[in-house]
Amino acid sequence: MTASNSKSDLTELGQTLLSIGTLLMSSGANCQRITKTLERLAGAFNCTVDLLITHKALMVTINAHGVEYFHSGLKRTLPHGVNFKIVSGISRMSWSVVEENWSVAQSIRK
């Protein structure tokens, strides 16, 4: 994602990060892992992310460097369980996004 991307691109990325973050939360990931993973993903698209993590919800605000608009969203989480297969899979996916320059659409499909 670059400064020339549209507001809808930023919204799509924000919603994707929100979905990934809540999936991590519901799968038993701790706050530090959620923060690092979402920061890594946002950074891969030249964006920064601010998070508010509570027991039942996640709030994400994403900003693209050099762009005057931002996206903010809130999503409630499902009851928490532990599924480290999902947690480690999302972590591996986030590194692939960084190393292989995936698009937001590729991140959603995987």
Image (cartoon, helix red, strand yellow):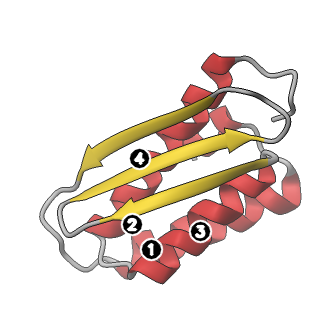
Residue 29 percent location from the top left of the image: 38, 78
Instruction: Compare residues 30 and 4 and report the one nearer the observer.
Output: 4
Distance from the alpha carbon under mark 1 to that under mark 3: 10 Å
Residue depicted at x 20% and y 69%:
55
User: How many residues crowd around disc 3 within 10 Å: few (fewer than 14), some, or many (20 or more)?
Assistant: many
**Quadrant hosting residue 77:** bottom left
**Mark 4 in CB contact with mark 2 (< 8 angstroms):** no
Which residue in the structure is indicated by mark 1? 87
Residue depicted at x 26% and y 67%:
54
**Mark 3 in CB contact with mark 2 (< 8 angstroms):** yes
The three-letter amino acid code for the residue at tag 4 is: Ser
> Is label 2 in a helix, a strand or a loop?
helix
Mark positioned earlier in the residue sequence (3 or 2): 2
> Is label 3 in a helix, a strand or a loop?
helix
Which residue in the structure is indicated by mark 3? 37
The three-letter amino acid code for the residue at tag 3 is: Thr
Which residue in the structure is indicated by mark 4? 19
